[in-house]
Amino acid sequence: MPVAHLSDRGVVSVTGADAASLLQGLVTCDIDRLQPGEASLGALLTPQGKILFDFLIVHAPAGTLPGLENGGFLLDVAAASAADLAKRLNFYKLRAKVVVSNHGDDFAVAVRWNDEGPQLPGLVWVDPRLGALGQRAVAPAAAVAGTADADANAAHMAAWRAHRIALAVPEGGADYAFGDVFPHEADLDQLGAVAFDKGCYIGQEVVSRMHHRGTARTRMVAARLEADAIASQGDDIMAGEKRLGDIRARAGAHAIAMVRLDRYADALANNVTPTVGGAPVTLTRPVWATFDMAGN
C-alpha cells in the first residue's frame, strides 16, 4: 500500500529549554525516557482523569524539520483538536521557556504500514503503539501532499483506517469522545501511553488508583461481525435484554467496541450470545492486550 497522507491529523510542536520538563509534568507518558527520534502514545487529562487529548509524541532531533533547528517535541494529534491542544499547553506553560505552535498547514502526518510504496518523507518513526501499525512521519505539507493525488489518498486513508480497526487500536476523536473516557477504558495503559512510575501529572491520582485497584470495568475490545450485519458506530451490543456496550468503529467484518467486562462475563457464564442489530457479534481481547475479558 502506498503512503497515506492522514489529513485528519494535525501537528503541534513544543520547543524551548523547558519543553521536556513542562510536558513531563502534564502528560501521561514518560517524556524523560524518549531519546531523539523515539515516540510514545500519550494523553493530556482532566483533573478528574478523563482524556482531553490523545496523541503520538515524538522527540524531534535538532535540525530535522524547518523551525526545529534546536529540536523539540512534535505531537501528532487529531486535526480537529490541534488548536485546542496548543491553546491548553500555552495556558499551562506560564513563565516556562517554551514555545507552543500549532502548525496547521505547515506540517502533515503520513503513514506507511508495509514494505511497499515510497519511503516516508521528513521525520520518520516506528509507531509506538504496535509494530503492525508500521511507520509514521511528520514532514512539510508539500512533501506529504506530493505522495498521492486527492482521490488516491482517500482510498489510502480508508485502507489505513481499516487496518487500524482490524488491529483494534482505538483513536480519540474518532472512536471515543474527548472528555468522556478514562485512559484504561480506551486501553491507553495497554498501548504504552501511561507511565505508572513517573512523577505527578494532571489526573494521575485517579488513573493510578484505577490501575492499582483494578477497577477498570469498561474496555475497548475487538469485535467480529457477520459480513452482512447491519451495524455502525453507536449501535448497542446486547446480551438478551442487557446492554453490554456499543460499536465505536467498523470496517467490514472488523470493529472496535466499548464493552462492560463484568456484563460480558455474566453473558458468558449464562451462555448468552452478544448481538448487535439482532446479529451475533464475537467480542475478544485485542491480540496486543493483557487485561482479563472475564472481568476479574
Image (cartoon, rainbow, N blue to C red):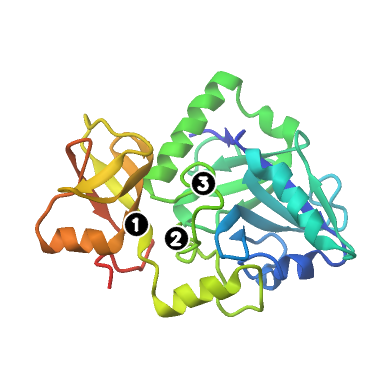
Q: Give the mark nearer the N terminus: 3 vs 1.
A: 3
Q: Are marks 2 and 1 in contact (CB under 8 Å)?
A: yes
* Disc 3: which residue: 177
Determine the secondary structure under disc 3: loop
Residue type of the residue flagged with mark 1: Pro
Q: Nearer the viewer, residue 230 or 9?
A: 230
Q: Give the mark nearer the N terminus: 2 vs 1.
A: 2
Residue type of the residue flagged with mark 2: Asp
Residue 122 at least partly seen: no
Determine the secondary structure under disc 1: loop
Q: Which mark is residue 286?
A: 1
- In space, the residues marked 2 and 3 are separated at their CA atoms by 14 Å
Frontmost of labels 2 and 1 is 2
Residue 42 at least partly seen: yes
* Disc 2: which residue: 187
Number of residues whose C-alpha sits closer than 10 Å to that of mark 1, classed few (under 14), some (14–19) or many (20 or more) = many
Q: Nearer the viewer, residue 17 or 134?
A: 17
